[in-house]
Amino acid sequence: MEVSENPGIAISTPGATTQRRVTVFEQININVFWIANNFHWQALLAIVIPSMVVKFLGDANKDINLAIVVIWGTLVAFAVNPLVGAISDYATFRLGRRRPFMIIGTIFNVFALVLFAFSPGWFTSTQLLIAFAVIFLLLQFTNNIANSPWSAIIADKVPTNQRGMTAGFNGLFQLLGTILGSIIAGIIVNKNDALALYKNEIVKIFLLIAAVQIVFVIYTIITVKETPLSEHAKFELAPVLKKFFFKPSTYPDLSWVLLARFLVMMGIWGVFYFLQYYFDDVLGGPGVKTILFGSNFSGEGFSGTLFLPVLLLFALPTSLIAGWLSDRHGRKIMVYVSGVVMTVVCVVFILFQTQYGSLIAAAFFGIGYGAYTSVDWALTADALPPTDEAGKFLGIWSAMGILPQVVGISIGAVILQVLRGLPNHFGYTTLFLVTIVYFGLGTLVIRQVKGVR
């Protein structure tokens, strides 16, 4: 693999050397976009797409079919994310380096959402698997054009001593978008409904996602101002691609942080895609009622109206508290805590395969995930090399949250498909055991980070 001995290029970043203190309101405005972005992806990945795969493609091969639908688009996102982030480092638009990409990406993302909404009525059942995969690819491509450059806006505008709190808002708004997407999609979509009604539900949720994207992006563009890049820097594709390959020994702390993120996200995504199927296969069945509400059980409904709300109840305060604590006591201790707690989640799923057991797991998952998301970005920002290419490196950071989706869902789909039909839901037990290994390794890797507390 070709590497670069000196991957940094000195490009002037507006305010990089004299960043002023930002207000709480400015920190909110910087991060509010992530409510819409996580609403978008949580509704689709946790509820809508797994549900559509079962309803339109059948139950027999749902695990493999789900993997086929999402893998190719996720691979595209893995490539687009760091590349667009790097391109934005050089952008000299009057609106700034990051906002133009948000505008362009969102416009085309809305078109892709509308296409997905009506696709079940335009293709035959044999064509739908390919159609879903292609449209999902378009969703990933367009959405990552919008969000990848925006990952660097905190490094552009927020001084180091405020990044923990700003990252706390980042984690908070991601969680808000996550839970809103889950609840609303879980209420709207139910694969047990008649086909005609179900198609209307799908159109409704996709159009709602598009509307949320438009509103939040417009608000962000209006409230967050950027100073255009003062120096003109010519962007050349080949040198930038070359610079993505850097020796881990050149920036060891950043390399360990990225590896830890990859492993932890492997654990999260390896389970996340299949939660709805776990709820249907393990907790559901004929005549089963949802606890508390007493309604007919569905994986979408349990996930969206019970499991994820409990997760949010514990994750929201944790995300803010952990971000605040990390500014004072260090980022690494929060990663250790989150790793241990998310391991407990897997143990609970294995030992207590009931609706109440799943809600206990949701509480632990909220504590662990809230702590991790609040410090993950700040830890990476602290480990960034002393160059003015934050967009590139944070694009790689984003990619380390994307590639695990491909690997995690592929391994998970094979495990569940091969072990399908074995007694005591052995396939899901195996999946959770493998996930414990991911979390353990990801937590241990952080010990190797020496230059960040």
Image (cartoon, rainbow, N blue to C red):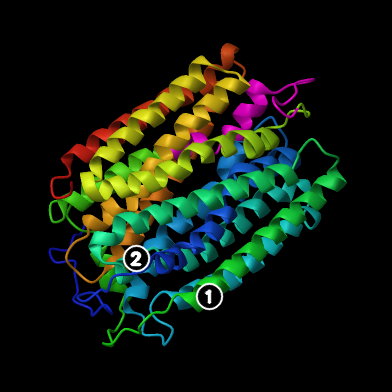
Dot label at residue 241: none
* Relative to 410, residue 178 above or below: below
Please report whichever mark, 1 or 2, sits nearer to the chain's N-terminal start: 1
Range shown magenta: 268-293
Q: Does the segment drawn in magenta span residue 155?
A: no
- Amino acid of disc 2: Ile
Q: Does the segment drawn in magenta span residue 271?
A: yes
Q: What residue appears at the point 19 percent right and 74 percent down from the top-left corner?
A: 9
**Disc 1 to disc 2, how far (Cα)?**
18 Å
> Left or right of 320: which side holds 222?
right
Write down the quadrant of residue 88 in the picture: bottom left
- Residue 247 position in % (x across, y down): 17, 55
Question: Mark 2 — residue?
Answer: 154
Q: How many marks?
A: 2
Question: Mark 1 — residue?
Answer: 103
- Residue 384 position in % (x across, y down): 22, 59
